[in-house]
Amino acid sequence: MLAISSSHIKPIAQAGLIAKGIVYTVLGLMAFMAAFQIGNQSAENTGKEDVFSTIEKQTGGQIMLAVLGLGLLCYSLWRMIQAFRDTEDKGNDAKGIAKRSRYFFSGLVYTALAFYAFKMLFAGASGGNNKQGSVQKVLNQPFGEWLLGIIAIIIFSIGVYQCIYGLSGKYRKHLDKAANSDNKILLRIAGKIGYVARGIVWLIIAWMFGKAALHSNSSEAGDTSKAFSFLADATYGTYLVAATGLGLICYGLFNFIRARHEKFHV
């Protein structure tokens, strides 16, 4: 078996964190623009898939999309290595396995995102009803409503974890990797705001999946863009969408700083 060293992991993890940072930074910018209707941007077209579409439309967009897809695959690979090699010494007890499973799940999510980027690059984007179609397939299964309800609970748990991770300051374990106090201060602010904003989006998505399960109606489920539409329709929606967008930009910045200063090991 090929030995994997920290020197092998570092460029993979850095590329992955940079790619993830780009996705969230662009997503946050799109949300902020949608809040104030800048450049005809709307909340309905503010999802992670729309990030890829926006990048592809830029000069040299196909090259940038290919690089971004490769970066997301690097992030997935790093998460899988963390899960299976236990690089952070989480252990094999129930708590450790739960944390390592989170890395595995994260790897699957970003593998899917990378696949979507390459699909758009080589086959073009297919439309926005794919998620509803997938949800309907779940509902069509035996006990489909219960299965979708379990998915909603998992997404809800992720959202709660993200908020707690930010508010409790657990993300500060990355602060020791920052080179100087200025970076530590920036990382502290970006981390707290970024994780909470990301958690809020997950919680809204969980609520929508829960409604879809309760009413057995796939059209009530949604992704990031539908979550922003929900915020936009709320009281003070403009400011809620803008604040969440700024929070996601902070999360993107958090990933950039981590890519620069993290000490990766196996």
Image (spheres, rainbow, N blue to C red):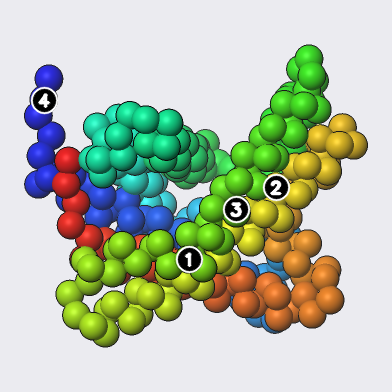
| Mark sitting earlier along the chain (3/2) | 3
Q: Which quadrant: the C terminus?
A: top left
Q: Which residue is mark 2?
A: 206
Above or below 25: residue 104: above
What residue is at 35 percent from the left and 80 percent from the top?
A: 186
Q: Amino acid at mark 1?
A: Ser
* Quadrant occupied by the N terminus: top left
Q: Are marks 3 and 4 in contact (CB under 8 Å)?
A: no
Residue 60 location in percent, x, y?
38, 60
Q: Secondary structure at mark 3?
A: helix
What is the three-letter code of the residue carrying label 3? Gly
Give the distance between the C-alpha atoms of the residues marked 4 and 1, in whole angstroms: 39 Å
Q: Earlier in the sequence, mark 4 or mark 1?
A: 4
Is residue 75 visible in the rendered structure shown here?
A: yes
- Tell me whether circle 1 and circle 2 mark residues in contact (CB < 8 Å): no
Which residue corresponds to mark 1?
A: 168
Tell me which label, 1 or 3, sits earlier in the chain: 3
Q: Quadrant of residue 254?
A: bottom left
The local secondary structure at tag 4 comes to loop
Q: Nearer the viewer, mark 1 or mark 3?
A: 1
Going by the numbered disc 4, the residue's amino acid type is: Leu
Q: Specify whether 203 is left or right of 100.
A: right
Q: Which residue is mark 4?
A: 2
Instruction: Measure the C-alpha gap from mark 3 to mark 2.
Output: 8 Å
- The one nearer the camera, 196 or 164, is 164
Residue on which the image places disc 3: 159
Question: Which is more N-terminal, label 2 or label 1?
Answer: 1
Q: Is residue 73 left or right of residue 106?
A: left
Residue 129 spot, x, y in % from top left? 73, 40
Q: Closer to the observer: label 3 or label 4?
A: 3
Mark 3 residue crowding within 10 angstroms, few (<14) / some (14–19) / many (20+): many
